Amino acid sequence: MTTRELLAEFRAGSKRACARLMSVVENEPDVAAAVLDELYPMMGRSFRIGITGPPGAGKSTLVEKLGRECRNRGKTVGIVAVDPTSPFSGGALLGDRVRMPSLFTDPGVFIRSMATRGGVGGLASRTKEVCDVLDAFGRDCIIIETVGVGQVELDIAGAAHSTVVVLVPESGDAIQIMKAGLMEIADLFCVNKSDREGADRLVMEIETMVGMKARTPNPECRTSEVGDRRLAVSDWVPLVVKTVATTGFGVSGLLDQLEAHRKHLEGSGAMTERRRESIRSEIVELTEEWLRRDLWRRPVTTGRLNELVEQVLDGSTTPYRAAEAISRDVLAAG
Amino acid sequence: MTTRELLAEFRAGSKRACARLMSVVENEPDVAAAVLDELYPMMGRSFRIGITGPPGAGKSTLVEKLGRECRNRGKTVGIVAVDPTSPFSGGALLGDRVRMPSLFTDPGVFIRSMATRGGVGGLASRTKEVCDVLDAFGRDCIIIETVGVGQVELDIAGAAHSTVVVLVPESGDAIQIMKAGLMEIADLFCVNKSDREGADRLVMEIETMVGMKARTPNPECRTSEVGDRRLAVSDWVPLVVKTVATTGFGVSGLLDQLEAHRKHLEGSGAMTERRRESIRSEIVELTEEWLRRDLWRRPVTTGRLNELVEQVLDGSTTPYRAAEAISRDVLAAG
């Protein structure tokens, strides 16, 4: 089937075509941009919820229950589960059937698992693009689940409109949460398995920390050369919600709070600001990627590179001066 | 102390200055290039040994014993231990004192631990640069130990002249080794804890696999746009060495094989070829890094970016077309 035929089926609502286009976006970088460009006018309507937290916090169960709650409220759901597991650690990707039994057969739910296959390069942007496809497909809510809390996982969760950091009494104290960078990305905290000992203490610790942070703006707050989309939402103070995902306790309240956060984003103009920053960083990332790809295809650049490699070998220059020369040439001309 | 004073002390053999320059290279990208450029003429004499393999294979003990064996043969030693542990996994970086007790007080040994502090971005190139400093400092042998076998760790180990993949009978069978990409980077295999059950079977499996690979060149062998430095050494067939690092059994034989591999690299011209490819990829990486950094400092580019962001927002273009426009502009001019 050609990409054009796939797109036609996708527009007609075929889940199969949606899955195939996701695979294209994930695995065929040369075609991905054309597909996403085509789908772009259909994007921008879904509410993207990020769920992250340390292993063992019960995220999968929570995502399943949250998805069910969205369905109960009449919303269609997309779930993207990201598992950046290294090939040797033994953590195989669980099948969707096993992960989310109650959702798997619901036609209003689309579940997609993403693995890194040994490398994490570009995982965050590929996850975003898979969500873009679900968005264009018309899903009302997209839930992005990341396993673990490394930088890549934080980036993935941070690409959502609302990010829920899930913790359990066993996750350790609030200081560790802060150290792991979770304070920076949390729009809501969820203390799961909240029927266990230590849950109330953890809730209190987080609330204290959130309160301190609200009073003293952090000067080291994440900023980037191309702007910091977090700045626009600094007036939102993260709430702490208690859940017991296995029984469903608190899940409806969690979704209420997520909806409240969404309304806050829309009402305060932060949603548009986030959209602007998201577009900006997407253009920046794509530009850098394509520049890198095309640069070394130009005979003038590779010729210069070959020349400079030999000059380094014979001792007449160094790799640092060589790189400076090439990058200066490229930008001087522009 | 100024960088100039540090460099003077470094040249006079101060380990303290060496440690400080490593920190500069690791943490201050804007000064790093100037420092490395200055040190460049002093580099190129050390033999770099990469040690990698799954957790629990006894790599630290092996590295310590290997370092001691190098010392016994009159060589100075540098050890770089890379631990890409995420902040939440609980694996704290062990102190050097604890890691390598018998080497810590030896003035002929320099031990450096590197952590990722939550992100892995650029870890492979920063590791290479820390080794470059040790090289310029005049260390005869540099041993790079990586914990784990993710893509980043493989890249780090692959930057060595000789890469030893350490396995234990518990690591699983040869198929898993192949799957994890370890076949591609191994110049030598080391079956450690070889007094345990299953060691001989593992040795046999690896030898079979190595033999198969030697007969059938892999068409999917790693290549890159800027050349594949592995191609030049395809006539080397990896040997399997048995060790028991805790008792020191086999360590001298392992170093003999490493020396043999080094002689092979030098005799076959592969060492020069590797050097050429290493210079090439260093220039490519630095160029891409600096291009990315300087691109968004140019008013003409950021102006264009701001314009295009608004056009995407009002629906008159898409991020993909915008990125194409910017990257085309930059390269067309060059």
Image: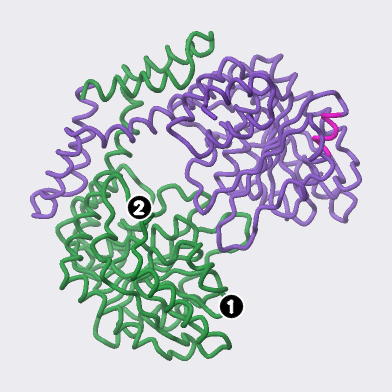
Chain colours: A purple, B green
Q: Chain of mark 2?
A: B
- At a point 80% along the width and 53% down the height, the residue shown is A169
Cα gap from disc 1 to disc 2, whole angstroms:
31 Å
Can you tell which mark lies on residue B307? none
Q: Amino acid at mark 1?
A: Glu
- Quadrant housing the C terminus of chain A: top left
- At a point 21% along the width and 52% down the height, the residue shown is B4
Q: Indicate left or right for A92 with B281 as reference.
A: right
In reply to whether residue A324 is colored magenta, the answer given is no
- What x and y, as percent, mark residue A97? 77, 47
Write down the region rendered in magenta: A65-71
Q: Quadrant of residue A10?
A: top right
Q: Quadrant of residue B187?
A: bottom left
**Nearer the N terminus, badge 1 or badge 2?**
2
Query: Which residue corresponds to mark 1?
Result: B170
- What x and y, as percent, mark residue B82? 44, 63
Query: Which residue corresponds to mark 2?
Result: B125
B234 or B123, which is in the foreground?
Answer: B234
Task: Give the secondary structure at mark 2.
Answer: helix
Q: Is residue A313 above or below residue A105?
A: below
- What x and y, as percent, mark residue A31? 46, 30
- At a point 37% along the width and 19% down the height, the residue shown is B302
